[in-house]
Amino acid sequence: MSDPNNPENPGRRARGELESDVLATLWAADGPLTARQVMERLPGDLAYTTVLTILSRLYDKGMLVRHREGRGFAYAPVRDEASHTARRMRSLLEEGSDREAVLTRFVSELSAQDEQLLHQLLAAHEARGEGPDGKR
Amino acid sequence: MLISVYVPFAVTALLTLLAPRLARGLSPRPAAWALACAALVTAVGWTGSLALLAFTGVAQIPQVAAEGHWSASALRAEDPVYLVVAAVSALVLTASVASLGVAAVRQVRLVVRARRECAALPGDTELAVLDDDTPVAFALPGSPGRIVVSQGMLRRLTDEERAALLAHERAHLRGRHHLFLALWRLAAAANPLLRPLAGTGAFVLERWADEEAATRVGDRPVVAHAVGRAALASTGAARPALAATGGEVPQRVRALLAPPPARRRMPFLVGALLLTMCCTSLANAASDSDRMVDTAERARCAELLISASTPPVGDHRHGPGFCRCPHHRGERESVAYR
């Protein structure tokens, strides 16, 4: 079993962070993923066994479902169809202007001008061949 | 007292003008700390100066003077503060304290609610995913804090951009950025002049998290694209209107597409100088005010001695402690004589 904090791991990400990364990857995917597929999608050079460990830990916590695929398993997140949590979070976000003092959101609202400007910025950057798509 | 009591106001006004302009281009982490110090010091300076000004006015009210055992007329003679100024200060101070109290109560309520929601989130992983197509991502402080992201947001980002998003929110939680926000919010409640500074602070925190994410991911453009795409995805989503945040996302993206901000010393030195001035002036004004009351107490002592037509015992330089002895007898007379 590999240690997630070993020096070969470039990001030296903690276990909790790896769990988040794996969980995010599975939620973003179109269907269930095998450990190898998850590994390929995660940035950095994670060991296969590390990914496997994280997947089975998340499965044990009841956050993933899995089914046999080939010699291993394919994993998918447990859906929250009733979406109770989503509704609660939405109401928290709509708590008036006070929420700004507690919640740090990833992005703030864009004005129409901002939107245009943003398109230009990103397009100009990609046109120079420096975008994430052009680079790798 | 004449000038020093007004210095904190001048410093506050100057910082209100300068800080939003300067802080945006600086290295965000030290800038956030500097803005936090600035907010704290100017809020204390502001209320302190108002309190001193208000006090000099209140202290001239005969009843208050009698209660405090000092001479109202001596205070009035010595004190250069106009009564109007003192009255306005008292009003503003009352408003400031009331507004601070209201803001503090709301803040506490919101923090309690956020912590409760944080604890109620399913699972014990750092990341809580909302089964919702609306793109949303934020850091929810608690013990431990959680990163809340909707599936809609995760699906709209590439593998690397997702890592950038998580690193960004992680930076908010690890840096305890909600405490900075609370400090700025309360400071701005006590003194509305600090609102631009608070707004700048919120922006600087986003920049701090962006820069930390860029370091973690090792790729600035990836973070820029993550921010840009998340923002573009979020427009049109049902969200409450936000005020005064216009232009922030493009600024962040532009900063990330440029090289990291250079370390500059000058603005921090100027800020430190201003804040030191604010502190020393307030201390100076406070000690002046203290000395003034001492003098008024001595004057009162002299008044009492004369009004009671007691032969002067010793000189006028007795401290207030000595003069307090004959007060009970002399108090009524001196008030009546006025």
Image (spheres, coloured by chain):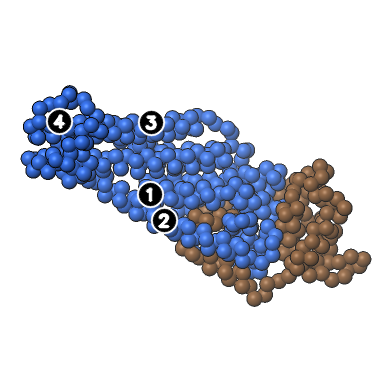
Chain colours: A brown, B blue
Quarter holding residue B49: top left
Tell me where residue B48 sits by quadrant. top left
1 and 4 marks on the same chain: yes
Mark 3 to mark 1 CA distance (whole Å): 21 Å
Q: Residue furthest bottom?
A: A82
Q: CA distance from mark 2 to mark 3?
A: 28 Å
4 or 2: tag closer to the N-terminus: 2
Disc 3 secondary structure class: helix
Report the residue marked by disc 1: B190
Label ID, residue B103 = 2
Element marked by disc 1: helix
Q: Do the residues bearing badges 2 and 1 touch, measured as CB atoms within 8 Å? A: yes
* Furthest residue toward right: A71
Q: Are the residues flagged by discs 4 and 2 from a single subunit?
A: yes
A10 horizontally vs B77: left or right: right
Does mark 1 fall on the same chain as mark 2? yes
State which chain disc 3 sits on.
Answer: B
Element carrying mark 2: helix
Q: Amino acid at mark 4?
A: Ala
Q: Nearer the viewer, residue B104 or A8?
A: B104
Q: Position of residue B107 (x, y in %)?
A: 46, 57
Subunit ID for the residue under disc 1: B
Mark 2 or mark 3, earlier in chain: 2
Secondary structure at numbered mark 4:
helix
The number of numbered discs placed on residues in the rendered structure image is: 4
Q: Amino acid at mark 3?
A: Thr
